[in-house]
């Protein structure tokens, strides 16, 4: 029997269609499991190595989710838990070992790293063909050139959501006005490059943007990745816009909310992602996709398709 309480309504109370990241991520994990099974018939098993440095509880939860997804899909996971007193040199030594290990296809160092570790040096040490977070200069540069290889998982997940939702509605980002709020290396910038690659007309907003409400009000696609709870007000949203909320904020009551005032925005948006259950699950699914892609690409088998 189906537990109807567990199935989210397809529409938010305000009227916007919900873009269900949980369901899409589950579908992607299923597709990847099939790909991994095929690889295993040829004696190949993708491997992901994850380093968790220090005691940050949120990071531990994220790493736990990634390891769990590896298990579900059949990816071999290697986990290194290191103390907060680890030095940059020690972490780089571990990355060098994983770079040299042919059974490791993807390397992920969970960020943020404890103070005192040179994050940039660590990220750049990861071999570009194993950089499954896509944060290194090589992969970001390829994306900027319009020739992506391994793309940062969160913006990659947002694009995949737009692609899958768009397919159902005969909708595409091509020719649409898109506003990305946030310009971080990990989310905002790659997000803007991906939308540009999909032929959207892209505006990037940040903390110095003079008229954020005006910019958002022009957008047919809004991607909110500012890290400010409810920064994007409902009345800013243009009628019929597609709204993707990347932000995650845990309130004092333990509840998660996003960068967008969901209740108000869903009265104007055509479609919107919830928090939780939107971009978050897609991020992990795309990490898995990148690991399988890295495995295939390193063996000359090409990226994951379909
Ligand atoms: P950062 O703090 O690195 O970047 C935030 C960006 O938002 C900056 O470019 C900043 O501008 C801009 N910004 C901040 N305040 C404002 C404002 N008032 N108006 C306009 N722009 C503003 O954050 P991340 O990119 O790492 O993450 C963004 C959010 O996404 C966070 O809530 C994070 O938790 C969440 N996240 C969610 C993930 C998921 O899986 N769902 C994964 C990764 C992140 P400036 O450059 O000028 O400082």
Image (tube, helix red, strand yellow):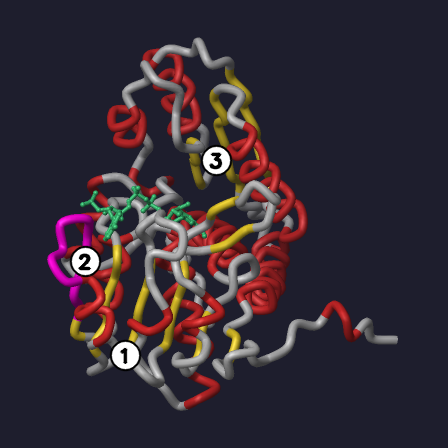
Q: Is residue 202 left or right of residue 242?
A: left
Residue segment shown in magenta:
202-211
Q: Secondary structure at mark 1?
A: loop
> Which sits earlier in the primary sequence, circle 3 or circle 2?
3
Distance from the alpha carbon under mark 3 to that under mark 2 = 37 Å
Residue located 20% across and 77% down the image? 218
Position in image of residue 105 (x %, y %): 45, 40
**Furthest-bottom residue in this view:** 170
Q: Which residue is labeled 2 in the image? A: 205
Distance from the alpha carbon under mark 1 to that under mark 2 = 15 Å
Q: Which residue is labeled 3 in the image? A: 104
Few, some or many C-alpha atoms within 10 Å of disc 1 (few <14, some 14-19, many ≥20)?
many
Instruction: Judge whether residue 171 is colored magenta.
Output: no
Q: Is residue 117 above or below residue 28?
A: above
Q: Which mark is residue 220?
A: 1
Instruction: Judge whether residue 207 is colored magenta.
Output: yes
Few, some or many C-alpha atoms within 10 Å of disc 3 (few <14, some 14-19, many ≥20)?
many
Q: Which mark is residue 39?
A: none
Position in image of residue 258 (x %, y %): 45, 56
Is disc 2's CB within 8 Å of ligand 1? yes
Is the magenta region chiefly helix, strand or loop? Answer: loop
> Which sits earlier in the primary sequence, circle 1 or circle 3?
3
Position in image of residue 213 (x %, y %): 22, 66
């Amino acid at each position: 029997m189906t537990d109807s309480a567990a199935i989210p309504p397809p529409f938010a109370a305000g009227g916007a269609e919900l873009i269900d990241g949980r369901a899409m991520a589950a579908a992607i994990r299923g597709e990847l499991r099939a790909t991994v099974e095929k690889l295993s018939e040829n004696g190949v098993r993708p491997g992901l190595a994850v380093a968790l440095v220090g005691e940050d509880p949120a990071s531990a939860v994220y790493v736990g989710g990634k390891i769990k997804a590896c298990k579900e899909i059949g990816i071999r996971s290697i986990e290194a838990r290191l103390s907060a007193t680890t030095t940059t040199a020690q972490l780089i030594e571990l990355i060098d070992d994983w770079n040299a290990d042919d059974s490791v296809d993807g390397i992920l160092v969970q960020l943020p790293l404890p103070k005192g570790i040179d994050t940039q040096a660590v990220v750049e040490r990861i071999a570009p063909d194993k950089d499954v977070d896509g944060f290194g200069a090589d992969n970001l540069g390829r994306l900027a050139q319009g020739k992506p290889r391994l793309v940062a998982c969160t913006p990659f997940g947002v694009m995949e959501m737009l692609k899958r939702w768009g397919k159902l509605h005969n909708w595409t980002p091509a020719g649409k006005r898109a506003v990305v709020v946030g310009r971080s290396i990990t989310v905002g910038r790659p997000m803007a490059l991906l939308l540009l690659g999909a032929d959207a007309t892209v505006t990037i907003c940040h903390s110095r943007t003079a008229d954020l409400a005006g910019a958002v009000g022009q957008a047919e696609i809004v991607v909110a990745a500012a890290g400010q709870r409810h920064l994007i007000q409902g009345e800013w949203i243009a009628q019929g816009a597609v709204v993707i909320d990347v932000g995650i904020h845990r309130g004092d009551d333990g509840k998660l909310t996003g960068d967008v005032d969901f209740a108000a925005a869903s009265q104007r948006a055509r479609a919107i992602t919830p928090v939780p259950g939107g971009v978050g699950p897609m991020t992990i699914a795309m990490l898995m996709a990148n690991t399988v892609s890295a495995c295939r690409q390193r063996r000359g088998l090409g990226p994951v398709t379909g």
